């Protein structure tokens, strides 16, 4: 066997110790570093805890303040609600009272108006009854008057027919058969009602100027009341025609450009310087170009 050197053995024995010692030192350093880190973390945790405490305090104070403010606002709202309810109840009571009062007033007015309307209706009914009674009496009077008028009309018609039947148609001074001749006012009225010709009455006094009768002019030149004769001058179509020494109720005839049938003048009465009669003209007139 090889014989070992004592110094080599000593050196080999010291190596594990050195390594162990180095490890212990490293472990101590690590513990120191870890401790320092823990202290740092603890400090940060303490700071964070203080910050959280302060923030929680601030939040608590804010919450208390907000709660207090909310409570006060809620109390105010409750008071306002109660006040509003009270006012609403009061207003409703007042409105109900006013509505009832107004309704009663309207009911009284309606009753008064109904009573007034009933009185008016009664009055009008009375007036209508009176008017109906008066109308009935009036109708009876009218019926009586109508019957009387019918009788008078029938009588007048009979008289008119009788008068017309008594009228005569004679030959005029031109030799032309005349229409019916009226000898007085009654017969002339009958002829007018008959409506076959136009009739224009005249009272013609003796004068130097002619008198307009219808669409002609007549000048009385002579009137002999004793002999019932007269002389006239007729002016028609700018022509003068003398009808001399004619008698009463004689048709004095002449033609004009306006008609195909002759005009006729009939004198019914001759007085001193005055004649009374009428002019008869045809209904159909010829238009002048």
Image (cartoon, rainbow, N blue to C red):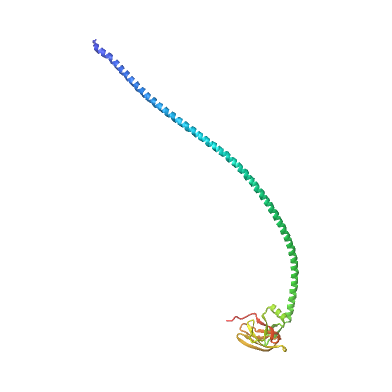
- Location of residue 219 (image quadrant): bottom right
Give the x, y percent position of residue 89.
61, 41
- Location of residue 283 (image quadrant): bottom right
The relative height of residue 53 versus residue 188 in the rendered view (above or below) is: above
- Foreground: 205 or 22? 205
Residue 130 visible in the displayed image: yes
Residue 248 visible in the displayed image: no
Give the x, y percent position of residue 32.
34, 21
- Foreground: 218 or 273? 273
Give the x, y percent position of residue 234.
64, 86
- Foreground: 166 or 76? 76
Does residue 95 appear to the left or right of 128 in the view shown?
left
The relative height of residue 227 versus residue 89 in the rendered view (above or below) is: below
Q: Quadrant of the N terminus?
A: top left
The relative height of residue 181 versus residue 73 in the rendered view (above or below) is: below
**Which residue is painted at 65% across and 47% down in the image?**
101
- Location of residue 282 (image quadrant): bottom right
Count the numbered circles shown: 0
**Which residue is painted at 75% across and 68% down in the image?**
141
- Foreground: 5 or 85? 85
**Which residue is painted at 75% across and 65% down in the image?**
137
Give the x, y percent position of residue 211.
64, 84
Q: Quadrant of the C terminus?
A: bottom right
């Amino acid at each position: 066997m090889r014989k070992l050197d004592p110094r080599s053995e000593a050196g080999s024995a010291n190596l594990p110790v050195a390594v162990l010692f180095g490890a212990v030192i490293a472990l101590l350093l690590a513990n120191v570093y870890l401790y320092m880190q823990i202290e740092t973390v603890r400090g940060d945790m303490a700071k964070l805890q203080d910050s959280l405490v302060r923030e929680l305090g601030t939040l608590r104070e804010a919450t208390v303040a907000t709660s207090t403010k909310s409570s006060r606002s809620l109390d105010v709202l409750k008071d306002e609600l109660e006040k509003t309810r009270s006012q609403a109840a009061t207003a409703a009571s007042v409105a109900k009272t006013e509505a009832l009062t107004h309704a009663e007033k309207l009911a009284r007015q309606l009753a008064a108006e109904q009573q007034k309307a009933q009185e008016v209706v009664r009055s009008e009914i009375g007036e209508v009854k009176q008017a109906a009674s008066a109308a009935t009496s009036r109708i009876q009077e009218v019926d009586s008057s109508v019957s009387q008028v019918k009788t008078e009309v029938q009588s007048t018609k009979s008289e008119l027919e009788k008068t017309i039947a008594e009228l005569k148609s004679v030959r005029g001074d031109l030799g032309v058969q005349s229409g019916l001749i009226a000898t007085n006012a009654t017969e002339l009225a009958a002829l007018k009602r008959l409506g076959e010709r136009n009739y224009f009455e005249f009272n013609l006094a003796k004068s130097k100027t002619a008198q307009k009768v219808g669409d002609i002019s007549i000048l009385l030149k002579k009137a002999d009341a004793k002999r019932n004769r007269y002389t006239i001058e007729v002016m028609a179509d700018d022509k003068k025609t003398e009808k001399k020494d004619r008698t009463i109720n004689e048709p004095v005839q002449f033609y004009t450009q306006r008609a195909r049938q002759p005009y006729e003048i009939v004198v019914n009465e001759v007085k001193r310087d005055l004649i009374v009669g009428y002019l008869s003209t045809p209904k159909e007139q010829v238009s002048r170009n």
